[in-house]
Image (cartoon, rainbow, N blue to C red):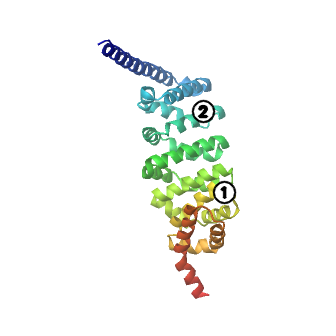
Amino acid sequence: MSENNSSFTESKNSSGEIGYEKENAKLIVSELIDLLNDERSYQDIGIATEITKTVHLLIKQGGSRRKEILAHPNLITFLIKLFNTDNDLTRLLASLFHDISIEEDGIRLLLLTGVIPIFLQTLESLNDDVINFVLTTLRNCLIGLNNEAAKEIQIHNGCMTFISLLIHRHSNKQMNFLADCLLRLAMFNTNAQIYLQTSKLFLQELVTILDETNYNKLSFTLIRMLPLLSSNIHTKSILIQFNIITILERILHMKYDYKIQRYCLLTLRNLSDQIINMVNIN
């Protein structure tokens, strides 16, 4: 009997703690919203920074506190307006949006509040470490919401923005993030796929990077793209013109793992009819 009473007491205490946590979260969010209603908050970087830190803390704590933040999109709408206005604040915001994007409900909030177009508009002007946060967030969106996220990104010139960054040749890690975002855009959005298949600038860059890089992760991501891109008849001749066959043969002889070899062979199979036609013409 005493054990039952003990279990009941523990359950009651646990319920009480959850209830207190919910009320506490509501109170904090209510205070944050009051701050947001004061126009001075937009002009005071110090206040905006503290709001960002508080929102981020609640997101990290999870549970009812995270849910309370997600239930108030106006908090995120306010904060995204301050993105790229101050270096330190932008770094904090990028980290916050990244943590929001870890789960699907957070990704939906980012799409709802217009975070993605602002990310894409400001991407090329950001510091490298912030760019990595932003690219990982966009990648999370593509993984979590596939077609929806790809459509939103492509509508706001996502392919063009990613290619422009790729051409500037940042770190290997960053180029891999960019390549992965482009791969997923092509997988989940027909317009993005056609854009990449018909962009000589992008195809030349892809082949050049693949030829020069020693970073295996980046090579693998680019090679994964090739079967999809080479399914287009016009893309085939462009890739052959840029000497992709020699590069693929070299990669095959290096005996990477099975998956890489498979993607190389799939690409060569796609290109085979075009190769035969070119040989016949010659």
Q: Amino acid at mark 1?
A: Ile
Q: In the rendered view, does 162 fall on the left or right side of 2?
A: right
Return the disc, 2 or 1, that comes first in the chain's sequence.
Answer: 2
| Distance between the alpha carbons at the discs numbered 2 and 1 | 27 Å
Residue 117 x, y percent position in the rendering: 52, 45
- The kind of secondary structure element at disc 1 is helix
Q: Residue at x 50, y 59 (%)?
A: 186
In the picture, residue 200 is in which quadrant? bottom right
Q: Is residue 30 above or below residue 155?
A: above
Q: Residue at x 54, y 66 (%)?
A: 262
Which residue type carries mark 2?
Leu
Q: In the rendered image, which residue does mark 1 sit on? A: 167
Label 2 sits on residue: 92
Q: Residue furthest top?
A: 2
Work out which residue is located at the far left of the displayed protein and give it. Answer: 1
Q: Is residue 267 above or below residue 13?
A: below
At 67% from the left and 43% from the top, the residue drawn is: 128
Tally the numbered discs: 2
Relative to the observer, which residue lies in front, 61 or 50? 61
Q: Circles 2 and 1: CB distance less than 8 Å?
A: no
Q: Position of residue 7 (x, y in %)?
A: 34, 17
Q: Residues within 10 Å of mark 1 (few under 14, many from 20)?
A: some
42 vs 72, nearest the viewer:
72
Q: Secondary structure at mark 2?
A: helix
Choose between 18 and 126: the one closer to the eye: 18
**Closer to us: 35 or 280:** 280
